Image (spheres, rainbow, N blue to C red):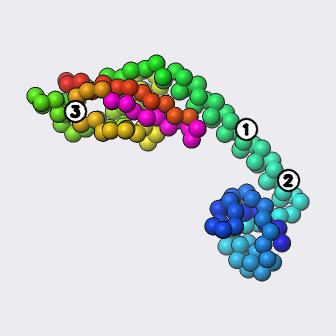
Amino acid sequence: MEVILKQDIKHLGEKDDIVNVKPGYGRNYLIPQGFAILATPSAKKVLAENTKQAQFKQEKIKKDAAELASKLESIKLTIGAKAGESGKIFGKVNSIQIAEALKTQGYEVDRRRITFETEPKTIGEYVANLNLHKEVKVQIPFEVVAE
């Protein structure tokens, strides 16, 4: 019995895979639980079309991320923070502050896509990693200065 998986199933396959299963497993478990649909010729055509459209969308998203990454490579940010005499800042610089600094320069980046190699807790220079796409990553240098 051929079925099309609607989600990843351990030891069987990933979403949108067409797999052969025993009739009882498909009829009594996969299909009633909503994990799979029967692989009829029309369902296979729909799957092929959906896969084609999803691939086109992913390519466009990746292209947009690559364009943004090429623009962001030349940027250097300066983040102001309150600091003590020893250079230690009160609190720490977080991804929200980096996202706001990028926004003031005209680049819209989601704060959840920003990570740090080392947490900025003192005045100095650091690097922020931006994961714009699973295949497109860029590093932005920034400097923390005392206000």
Q: Quadrant of residue 22?
A: bottom right
Secondary structure under the numbered disc 1 in the rendered image: helix
Which marked residue is nearer to the observer: mark 3 or mark 2? Answer: 3
The answer to whether residue 61 is above or below residue 79 is: below
In the rendered structure, are the residues bearing label 3 and label 1 in contact, judged by CB atoms less than 8 Å apart? no
Q: Residue 1: where, in percent of width, then height?
A: 83, 72
Q: Tell me the amino acid under the disc marked 3.
A: Thr
Q: Earlier in the sequence, mark 1 or mark 2?
A: 2
Magenta residues?
A: 126-135
Q: Residues within 10 Å of mark 3 (few under 14, many from 20)?
A: many
Is residue 118 in view from this perspective? yes
The answer to whether residue 120 is above or below residue 80 is: below
Q: Which residue, given by chain and number where applicable, does mark 1 sit on?
A: 56
Q: Which residue, given by chain and number where applicable, does mark 2 sit on?
A: 45
Q: Which residue, given by chain and number where applicable, does mark 3 sit on?
A: 122
Label at residue 92: none
In the rendered structure, are the residues bearing label 1 and label 2 in contact, judged by CB atoms less than 8 Å apart? no
Q: Residues within 10 Å of mark 1 (few under 14, many from 20)?
A: few
Secondary structure under the numbered disc 2 in the rendered image: helix
Q: CA distance from mark 3 to mark 1?
A: 44 Å
- Residue visible at 78% across and 72% down in the picture: 21
Q: Is residue 48 left or right of residue 82?
A: right
In the rendered structure, are the residues bearing label 3 and label 2 in contact, judged by CB atoms less than 8 Å apart? no
- Residue visible at 22% across and 33% down in the picture: 122
Q: CA distance from mark 1 to mark 2?
A: 17 Å
Q: Tell me the amino acid under the disc marked 2.
A: Lys
Q: CA distance from mark 3 to mark 2?
A: 58 Å
Q: Tell me the amino acid under the disc marked 1.
A: Phe
Q: Residues within 10 Å of mark 2 (few under 14, many from 20)?
A: few
Q: Residue 88: where, in percent of width, then height?
A: 17, 33
